[in-house]
Image: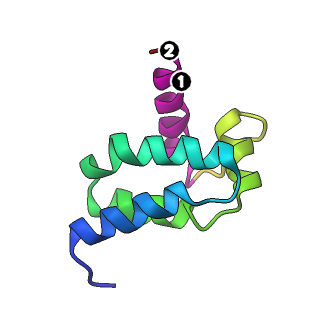
Amino acid sequence: MNEPREIRLKRLTMRSMRRGIKEMDILLSRFAAARLSGMDAAALDLYEALLEESDQDLYQWVSGQVPAPDVYAPLIAEIAEASQERAAK
């Protein structure tokens, strides 16, 4: 896909907000608002791949109930950290 960066960020932000499980809607939409604009193309590719995963798996990974797959582990840790920072405010 060869879309402009601004359109891609908007698309990924929207996909982050409309997940299906309210908890993931909240976690991912807040993460997207705070961090997507600072990500390079490779990081956005990884985030987009992560959005293809099921909400149940994502929630278990972010909450620490189940270890995230190695490919997603750093990104999941960043999402979990961002949600904890937000909760501490």
Q: Nearer the viewer, residue 25 or 83?
A: 25
Mark 2 crowd level (few <14, some 14–19, many ≥20, 10 Å Cα): few
Q: Residue at x 62, y 59 (%)?
A: 19
Identity of the residue drawn at 35% across and 40% down: 34
Q: Quadrant of residue 52?
A: bottom right
Q: Who is closer to the viewer here, 47 or 3?
A: 3
Q: Amino acid at mark 2?
A: Ala
Q: Is residue 33 visible?
A: yes
User: Residue 89: x and y, percent?
Assistant: 44, 15
**Magenta segment, prevailing SS (helix, strand or loop):** helix
Tell me the SS state at disc 2: helix
Could you say where residue 68 lies in the image, as x and y percent from the top left?
A: 67, 46
Magenta segment range?
A: 71-88
Determine if residue 73 is in view: no
Q: CA distance from mark 1 to mark 2?
A: 6 Å
Secondary structure under tag 1 reads helix
Residue topped by disc 1:
84
**Residue at position x 47%, y 25% from top?**
86
Q: Is residue 70 magenta?
A: no
Q: Badges 1 and 2: C-beta atoms under 8 Å apart?
A: yes
Q: Quadrant of residue 3?
A: bottom left
Q: Which residue is mark 2?
A: 88
